[in-house]
Image: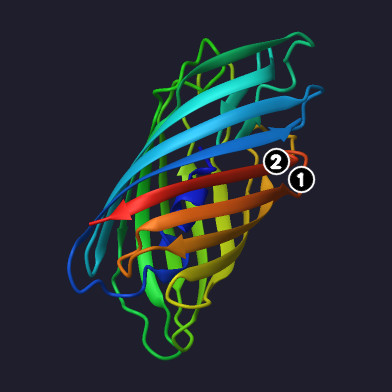
Amino acid sequence: MRWSHFVIISCMGVGMTGIAQATPQFTVGDLPSFFQGSFGTNSTINMFYNVTYFQYQNSTLRLKLEVPYLSVSGLPNGATLSGGSVVGRKGASTQTHSASGIGDVWLAAHYTVLQSSGLVPAIVPFAKIKFGTASASQGLGTGRNDYEIGLGLDETIGTRIFPFAHIAYRFVGNPPGANLQNIWTYNIGSSYLVNEHNVLTGMFSGAQSEQPGYSGPADMIVAWNYNVTRAGSGFQLYFDKGLSNGSPTFGIGIGGQVVF
């Protein structure tokens, strides 16, 4: 799901992947979130999204596995959650249902080919696979795999400011009759290291719509990380404000991670 970018914020991956790690790090975390909005339908959809994530990172490589649990109410019959939004809206019923279960599992690999130096940002190509593990019959996913390739630019300004920009192209799994299309996804923002414990992040994130003729998701996200240890173990809180008809009206999440 597209809301996995909040987990990236919680690991400080978006703004700071260009910083070399002296020793390999392992991260385990959990981030419960709640979203509400119409997502371009005629229904108010409430969604609880809890993702448990595992990450390995060294000076050049970052591997991450995200395993989510989903619980949704108000989802129109015939509509499906996909790509952080809702597809199948055109043929959706006015009747709604509730569903819960495992979401789509994501596996991502980021590789830093050039570290940030002066005015030159870190260059970080990446690849992701979304495994279609969410139930298609309940509308929790399409049941098909997605594949994504992209490029990140992560800059370091001084010792406190970490701007970033990422763009990717997603090959969307297309079930029979769904008429889904491949999409571009993107985000841009910056993290600010207030002190050794507090990090603030602001980010705009958007994507094309997988369903032709509808608005793609667009969100403004602000996040606060509190690091208990210098390695990055701590807590995070974020708030999401949807800016398009394809986004939730709002979202909020709070969680934590342990870095070894």
Q: Left or right: where does residue 162 sit relative to residue 177?
A: left
Measuring 48% from the left and 57% from the top, which residue is drawn there? 9
Q: Which of 172 and 189 is in front in this view?
A: 189
Q: Left or right: where does residue 244 sit relative to residue 227?
A: right
User: Helix, strand or loop at disc 2?
Assistant: loop
Measuring 50% from the left and 54% from the top, which residue is drawn there? 236
Q: Left or right: where does residue 248 sit relative to residue 127?
A: right
Query: Relative to 94, does residue 215 appear above or below in the rendering?
Result: below
Spot occupied by residue 200 in the image (x, y as percentages of width and height): 56, 68
Q: Is residue 193 visible?
A: yes
For disc 2, the marked residue is 247
Q: Which of 169 and 4 is in front in this view?
A: 4
User: Helix, strand or loop at disc 1?
Assistant: loop
Q: Can residue 210 be seen in this view?
A: no
Measuring 57% from the left and 35% from the top, which residue is drawn there? 181
Query: Relative to 248, does residue 93 appear above or below in the rendering?
Result: above
For disc 1, the marked residue is 244
Count numbered badges in the picture: 2
- Please, which residue is most extreme toward the front here? 228
Spot occupied by residue 18 in the image (x, y as percentages of width and height): 36, 73
- Please, which residue is most extreme toward the right here? 42
Amino acid type at circle 2 is Ser
Quadrant in the picture for residue 38: top right
Quarter of the picture holding the C terminus: bottom left
Query: Relative to 82, does residue 57 appear above or below in the rendering?
Result: below
Q: Which of 126 and 225 is in front in this view?
A: 225
Near mark 1 (Cα within 10 A), the count class, few <14, some 14-19 or many ≥20, is some
Spot occupied by residue 199 in the image (x, y as percentages of width and height): 51, 69
Q: Say whether marks 2 and 1 touch (CB < 8 Å).
A: yes
